[in-house]
Image: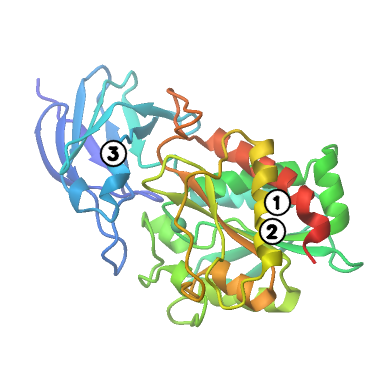
Amino acid sequence: MFAPMKVSSHFDGGNIEIVDITRPGDAHLQIRRDSHSEFLQWFNFRVSEVRDLALTLHIDNAGETSYPPGWKGYRAVATYDRQHFFRVPTDYDGKRLTIRHTPTRDSVYYSYFAPYSHERHQDLIARCLASADVHHALLGHTLDGRDMDLLTIGTPGDGRRVCWVIARQHPGETMAEWLVEGLLARLLDPEDPVARELRRQAVFHVVPNMNPDGSFRGNLRVNAAGANLNREWQSPTRERSPEVLLVRQRMEQTGVDYCLDVHGDEALPYNFIAGPDGIPSFTKRQEALQAAYEQALVRASPDFQTKYGYDPTPPGQANMTMCTTWCAERFDCLAMTLEQPFKDTADSPNEAVGWSPERCRQLGRANLDALLAVIHDLR
Ligand code: ZN
């Protein structure tokens, strides 16, 4: 009996379109474009009624995505239970991405990276609020009406440094929120000495998801209006980029001594930091602070490195519409973009899971070691 497999993506963060299912186990699919935008790369879908069936899933428009070099050496992420994620064999021929896998369960999910759902985001916020020292502010709403959540850990004042951590301006970079989950868990551990000392010396403002609409819609890079939020920091508007407007307003109230903006990079198989080099007011102090932070992070986590990353920006040539450049210029502070791989770390690969939620969480924890190394020097 011919029982065609079923492919679906009508859920939080889902993205795929069916071109054709020719025979059992063989599907031609394509990635849908982001909302009001030309970007496309994120996929996340479920395949059902396929136990013990050898699947060949072609993503026909992989060669037309935003970052085709991202497919070289890439392996798709799979999960049965939405808790444990593993990599599956994936080929790219320059045009088409092909996933080959024989599921051992009736249904299976495949995605570009382990998804981080809105439900999980809400659980994260609620879990953090179990700590008496954590405050929640609802900064406002997105264009689709979702909450913009801000967590504040500690009380401002007494010379405490002001540390900001934001993630997922680019919603398909789910590794950013996985990292923040680990960072928050450590920061709120009452018996972790690094966390205790940081909380004594600093107040933290954390936005675990800067782009809840894009996340839910299954976008790679933009919000509901098609805005790339990390190009909106110079002149955000209520109509196009309320997410940035709301966070920027709060930053103006709190000041900023440290800002970590967490991302993922499609092509490079490394964790690395991009700084605000090239901004008009870039100082030796900022340069030295960043170098000290990076060296401390190298010591704290062998998954982090400084050899590979983006080319430095010549003086005066910085794109000032990004969070890192805007913060560094506005507040004369340590501001950095932390990039993680979609693939794996070339220096410390893990065959089974690639770069994974747990490894993101561990890097989030390690960032607190790096922060402690420079906290005295932030001002
Ligand atoms: Zn990004």
Task: Indicate left or right for 341 with 24 as reference.
Answer: right
Neighbor class of circle 2 (other Cα within 10 Å; few <14, some 14-19, many 20+) is few
Residue picked out by circle 3: 72
Of residues 28 and 275, the one drawn nearer to the viewer in this rendering: 275
For marks 3 and 1 on the same chain, the one whose residue lies earlier in the sequence: 3
Can residue 129 be seen by looking at this rendering? yes
Amino acid under label 2?
A: Ala
**Residue 193: x and y, percent?**
85, 39
The count of marks equals: 3
Q: In terms of secondary structure, where does tag 3 sit?
A: loop
In the rendered image, which quarter contains the C terminus? bottom right
292 above or below 48? below
**Residue 5: x and y, percent?**
19, 31
- Checking the image for residue 292, the label placed there is 1
Task: Indicate left or right for 260 with 37 as reference.
Answer: right
Which residue sits at x=69%, y=68%? 333
**Residue 270: x and y, percent?**
47, 41
Foreground disc of the pair 3, 1? 1
Of residues 261 and 144, the one drawn nearer to the viewer in this rendering: 261
Which residue sits at x=69%, y=59%? 288
The answer to whether marks 2 and 1 mark residues whose Cβ atoms lie closer than 8 Å is yes
